Structure formats: structure tokens, C-alpha cells
Amino acid sequence: MANIIMFTILAVVILGSALLCVTTTRIMRAATFMLFVLFGVAGIYFLLDYTFLGAAQISVYAGGVTMIYVFAIQLVSKRTLQGMVEKIKTSRIVGNSLVCLISLLVVSAILLKAGLVSNFSAVADTELTMKQIGTALVGSDKYEYVLPFEFISLFLLACIIGGLVVSRKEESK
Amino acid sequence: MVPVECYFALSALLFFIGVYGFVTRRNLIAMLISVELVLNAVDINFAAINRLLYPNGMEGMFMTLFVIGVAAAESAVAIAIIINVYRNFRSDNVDAITNLKR
């Protein structure tokens, strides 16, 4: 029962913040509402007993990615911050929301037809230990993940270099 | 316990809110924020399926973990590109960017 109440609160926070995030015309507010969405999703992970995932979500997304966005907004759109709002055509809003609603209905129909059955009651209400996660992350057996782990470290290095190269100021000749 | 359909409904709603934002907004940073919403919706789906339907595996959890890492890298590169675009075109609106190179 407590889980259902927590889930309802988190769902309301996530969906409300997401709606405000895509409808507000000021970019800084959109970034702030995205922060609320990220915290709500971290709460969902805690609710699912994925404590490590929730901590990673808060530290990487809420701590890192949101900071990058705030920096970019401060660097890029000073006029937007000072009260100039984005103009969106009403016809575009109506058309796009109709398309999204239709797609949502199709997806909901598919989900209802699939009729998935949860077997949550079969397992004990325990969280994954850090030891299990660490062993699976750097093991090389079946269902262990050393290859994506190494790949993502190379990928992050490439992204650091790529970001530096792209955002470097070109020297005036 | 919260039934798994509730997580699916939450994830589907968040996904289509993100899609709506992506196709409606015309500001580069706002579009990127909408992409983050979509990625979070997918993450919720992975974690919920792993926990509630296949509780003995860890695939969904690791998928979510790697998605978080890739999303951080992706947004860093995208922000670098946006700053460069703003420097060259003096605008962060997608309709203003018509040339690949000045």
C-alpha cells in the first residue's frame, strides 16, 4: 500500500514536471523542470530497490547533465533568459499533440493486448548487493558485462576529445 | 505491490511527452531536454521489466546504467555542437541553421 502511494506521488511529480517542461517557453524553466523529472525517476529506481541505479541517476543526470545544460543556457541564449520567449505556432501545437495522442493510444492498446503478468510476489524484497553488481560489471562470463564497460570508457574518452575539438574557438587568420 | 502496467503507463506517457516536446520546440537546447525525457522513459521501462517480470536477471539494470552513461556523453557533445552553432549563426533556433558550413 505504501508502495502504491509513493508510486502515485512520484508519477504525478514526473508527469507534471515533464508536461511543464515541454510547454513552458523559457529554457531555464524547462531545465529546472527536467531536474524534477530526473529526481522523480531516481525515486522510481529506489522504489524498485535498485539503489545503485538511483544513486547513479542522481549523481550523473541530476548532478552532471543538468549542470551542462545550465552552463549551455547561460552561454548561448542570454536573450531567452532575459524574458524573450520562444514563439510556437498554435497549429503546430495542435497537430503535434494530436499525433502524440494517437501514438499513445496505439501503444496503450498494444500493452493492454499483451497482458503481461507480474511475478513480483515470487521474489524476496531485497536489493542487489554492490558485490553482485561489481562482479557482473567486470566479469567476462555469460551475462557479465566487461565488454560494454570497456566500450563505454573508450566512448566517454572519444566524447571528451570530440567535445573539445568541436567547441574550440577557431583562430582568426 | 505496484503492478507492472502502472510503470508501463508512466513510461509511455513520459515517452510521448518527450516526443511532443521534440517535434514542437524549435530551440536546440529545448529539443535536447526532450530527448532526455525520452531516454528516462525508456530507462524506467528497462528497470521495471527487469525487476517485476525477470527478477533473477540483471540485464535491464545494466542496460539502464549504460544508457545513463551514454546519455551523459551524448549531451556533452551535443552541447559543444550547440555552442559552436550559436557562435557561427548567432541563433539557437533550428530554423536559422540552413547551411552546414559558412
Image (cartoon, grey):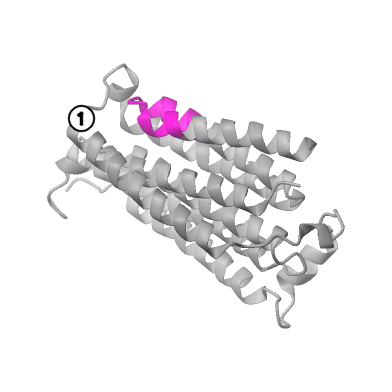
Toward the viewer: B3 or A67? B3
Q: Is residue A65 above or below residue A29?
A: below
Q: What amino acid type should be assigned to the residue bearing mark 1?
A: Thr
Give how far across and how far down residue B86 sits, in percent.
25, 39
Viewer-closest of B9 and A144: B9
- What number of labels is visible? 1
Where A17 falls versus A60 (above or below)? above
In the picture as drawn, the residue positioned furthest to the top comes out as A83
Q: Residue at x 51, y 58 (%)?
A: A111
Residue at 84%, 58% in the rendered image: A129
On the picture, is B88 further left or further right than A161?
left
Pinpoint the chain carrying mark 1.
Answer: A
> Quadrant of the rendered structure where residue A23 is?
top left
Left/right of residue B95 with respect to residue A32 in the rendered view: left
The question of residue B48 being in magenta is answered with: no
Relative depth, front residue between A85 and B41: B41
Q: Please give the name of the residue rendered at 24% of the width and 47% of the height, measured from the top-left corner.
A: A171
Q: Is residue A66 above or below residue A117?
A: above
As drawn, the residue found furthest toward the bottom would be A141
Residue B46 percent location from the top left of the image: 60, 59
Q: Position of residue B10 (x, y in %)?
A: 55, 44
Say if residue B59 shows up in the picture: yes
Number of residues whose C-alpha sits closer than 10 Å to that of mark 1, classed few (under 14), some (14–19) or many (20 or more) = few
Q: Which residue is mark 1?
A: A90
Q: Is residue A89 visible?
A: no
**Range of magenta residues:** A19-34
Residue nearest the observer in this picture, A168 or A36: A36
Predominant secondary structure, magenta span: helix
Q: Position of residue A99 (x, y in %)?
A: 29, 47
Of the 4 image quadrants, the one containing the N terminus of chain A is: top right
Which of the 4 quarters of the picture holds residue A144? bottom right
Q: Secondary structure at mark 1?
A: helix
